[in-house]
Amino acid sequence: MVASEIAARILARTDDPSAITADMPEVMSAINEGQELAALLSLCLETTTPLTLAAGAPFGTLISRLPDYICPLRLSVSGARLRPGTLAEFDGDNDAWQATPGVPARYSTLGWNLYAVTPQPVSTTIAELIYARSPRVMVEADTPEIPEQYHQSLVYYGKYRVRLKEGAQGLARGVSDFNVFLDAMTQLGDWVRARSRAARYDTLPIELALFDRSRLLLKEPKPKPGKKAAA
């Protein structure tokens, strides 16, 4: 499906399309948001790119160079894989790791942007980074980048998203659609997790199957006790 077909299905599945006053830009925004969330939850999109490691620099940033970056999957130098670790581990192994020249052997990422390597290369080095990425923004004629069998999940997310502005009533109607979307992302995440383990990637998708969704479900209010029950 292309994005315009997904948008048409969203409007067709709405009880009263005119009630949501949804124009195409609004629906497209919801579809793009759904695909962005799908990529974040499942890490299903990845890219391989060269990463320049500056000589003697223990730290570097990623977002300015890789605006679609989500998280690292593998970092290697000259075909040798760098093992992931934490700054605490680096400090424990060598308290002077930030000023230790050599061939990079380990790396760490902090937050969304910062990374560190140890030892630091003595000259500018080109590493290879495989990372999970966010999708490109779609227009109506574009095809979603997530696997084709999960395009229908964007219909459910889009229907849920465009009705949120209706308030509590829109949320109540949309929770079931959002849970269908999360069910699909759980399946996609399981598939990506198996693929990532086989490839020995450093980062796996979150375990959506263990995520407690009970707070997202609106429970029916308990009926008030009658006079007899009250007595």
Image (cartoon, grey):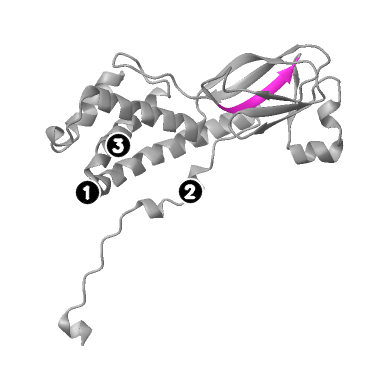
Give residue 169's mark.
Answer: 1
| Helix, strand or loop for disc 1 | helix
Residue receiving disc 2: 211
Depth check, front residue: 173 or 195: 173
Residue 116, percent from left and from top: 72, 28
Q: Is residue 75 magenta?
A: yes
Amino acid at circle 2? Phe
Residue 228, percent from left and from top: 17, 85
Secondary structure predominantly adopted by residues drawn in magenta: strand
Give residue 161's mark.
Answer: 3
Q: Could you tell which of marks 1 and 3 lies nearer the N-terminus?
A: 3
Where's the N terminus, which quadrant? top left
Residue numbers of the magenta segment: 70-77
User: Residue visible at 24% across and 46% down?
Assistant: 167
Could you give the CA–CA distance between mark 2 and mark 3, rounded to whole angstroms? 20 Å
Residue 206 in view of the camera: yes
Where's the C terminus, which quadrant? bottom left
Q: Could you tell which of marks 1 and 2 lies nearer the N-terminus?
A: 1
Amino acid at circle 1? Gln
| Quadrant in the picture for residue 31 | top left
**Which label lies toward us, 1 or 2?**
1
| Helix, strand or loop for disc 3 | helix
Could you give the CA–CA distance between mark 1 and mark 2, rounded to whole angstroms? 25 Å
Q: How many marks?
A: 3
Q: Do the residues labelled 2 and 3 touch (CB within 8 Å)?
A: no
Left or right placement of residue 62 versus residue 42 in this view: right
Residue 33, percent from left and from top: 37, 30
Categorize mark 1 by other alpha carbons within 10 Å: few (<14), some (14-19), many (20+): few
Amino acid at circle 3? Arg
| Quadrant in the picture for residue 23 | top left
Q: Could you tell which of marks 2 and 3 lies nearer the N-terminus?
A: 3
| Helix, strand or loop for disc 2 | loop
